[in-house]
Structure formats: structure tokens, C-alpha cells
Amino acid sequence: MKHLLVDVKCSDAVIKEKALKELRNVCCQCKACELHKTRTSAVFSDGNPDAPIMLIGEAPGADEDATGKPFVGRAGQLLNTFLEEAGIDRQRDLYICNTIKCRPPQNRVPSNEEKLACQGYLIGQISIVRPKIILLCGSTAANSFIDEDFKISQIRGKWLNLFDDIDVMAIFHPSYLLRNHSLETGSPRWLMKRDLLNIKAKLDEIRTQTDN
Ligand code: SF4
């Protein structure tokens, strides 16, 4: 996906917000794949257009489809808890979106055709926001960026060299953590906490460099 990013030269928050609004308007009218027939609303994004971190999930669920906002259901609330514990401010530090903007029926995994049809919006969002860090939340998001076969449990928590100027990490999707309650050392929730502390440390490092 790296080679598909475009240099749109959105230098400040106001210009980014305007460019994203235009892209959102196109997305909300989109009929490029079958998913438009069953959606209530396209779910474009939430958070700060000028955020240092972009979090990319899989696809909207029922709550997201109803509200038009990503990560607002039970999984989103769990994500909020993990972010707060790590000292990451969802509204200030994150721009949140999904790989697919319309809800797949019964929350099935999006097909490759649907991902391809929707890819332009994601590329546009990354190109406009130009985050310092991208978090690939779950296998579907990671699959959009990594060609080889992998298990999310093997690649999560490592900084991936996918872009020259953006640090990328795959993390567990909170819906997976809803099914795994243990906090024991080495459990998925324990690993998620550790990954987010690692991400917060990277964020602090970036902020220190920017301030100097
Ligand atoms: S999922 Fe993406 S490509 Fe398909 S209709 Fe929605 S916005 Fe368009």
C-alpha cells in the first residue's frame, strides 16, 4: 500500500479536516460494492484529523452502523479503557477508521473484493492525516498491509518497517479481547497493555523530537 499514498500536502489541522470532510462526503454516497445495500450509514472516522496516531480496525459493527462512528460498541468501550490505562487520549492522540467503511452482514469478515473497492478511502485518509504511527488493529487491517501469511499473535507488538516515515504496529482487536478475560502474564489482555505502553513511549519520543 506504501506506493499508493499520495502527497496531498495537508500541512495543518484545518486543511486536513477540510480534505477529510470532502472524502467523507464521497464515501457516504459510495456504492462501489454490495455493502452499500445493507448499511445504515457509512462509517468514515472519528478523532483528531491531525493526530499523531492512526488506528485502523476491520469494519463497522451494528453499533457503528447505527451511529456512523467507529469503535463505539462493546469492543470500542474496551479499547477506550486500554487506551486510558496507557495514557493515550482517544480524541486528541488518535484518528480512528476502519479498513471497510460499511458493515458486512452478520459482521462477517470483508471479502478481498470489498477491501479492494474500499481501499481508496483508506489510502486517502492516510495520505491526508500523515500520522507518525499507524496501529493495525486485528488481522483484517494487518492483512491489508502485509502480503505474507501471518498470525496476528506472531506479528503483534513489533514495529514494522512498512513506510519510510510512519512507524507501524499490529495489535489485537478489542473484540478478540472481549472473548479473552484473563490478565495473567502472557495473556492477550496482558500483551495488549504492554503493546499500548510501548506505543505511548514511542508517542512521547516523537513529541520530544517535535518540540526540540
Ligand atoms: S464498503 Fe467501501 S467501497 Fe463498499 S460501498 Fe461502502 S464505502 Fe463504498
Image (tube, rainbow, N blue to C red):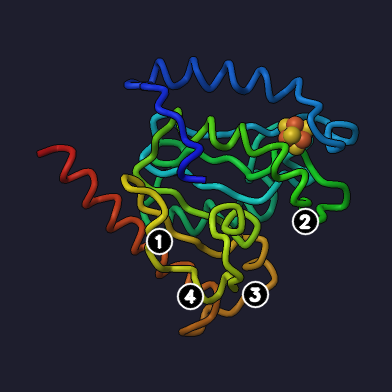
Q: Residue at x 48, y 75 (%)?
A: 190
User: SS of the residue at dot 3?
Assistant: loop
Q: Nearer the viewer, mark 4 or mark 1?
A: 1
The label shown at residue 190 is 4
Type of the residue with mark 3: Asn
The three-letter code of the residue at mark 2 reads: Val
Mark positioned earlier in the residue sequence (4 or 2): 2
Distance from mark 2 CB to nearest ligand 1 atom below 8 Å: no
- The answer to which of marks 4 and 1 sits earlier in the sequence is 1
Residue placed most toward the observer, 20 or 32: 32
Disc 4 and disc 2 in contact, CB within 8 angstroms: no
Q: Is residue 78 left or right of residue 127?
A: right
Question: Which part of the image, by quadrant, shows the C terminus?
Answer: top left
The numbered mark at residue 160 is 1
Q: Earlier in the sequence, mark 4 or mark 3?
A: 3
Specify which label sits upstream in the sequence, 1 or 3.
1
Task: Answer left or right for 142 relative to 100.
Answer: left
User: Which dot, 4 or 2, sits closer to the camera?
Assistant: 2
* Nearer mark to the viewer, of 1 and 3: 1
Residue located beneath label 3 in the image: 180
Mark-to-mark CA distance, 1 and 3? 25 Å
- Residue drawn where x is 41% and y is 44% of the image: 53
Q: Nearer the viewer, mark 2 or mark 1?
A: 1
Cα–Cα gap, marks 2 and 3: 20 Å
Q: Are marks 2 and 3 in contact (CB under 8 Å)?
A: no
| Number of the label disc, if any, that sits on residue 109 | 2
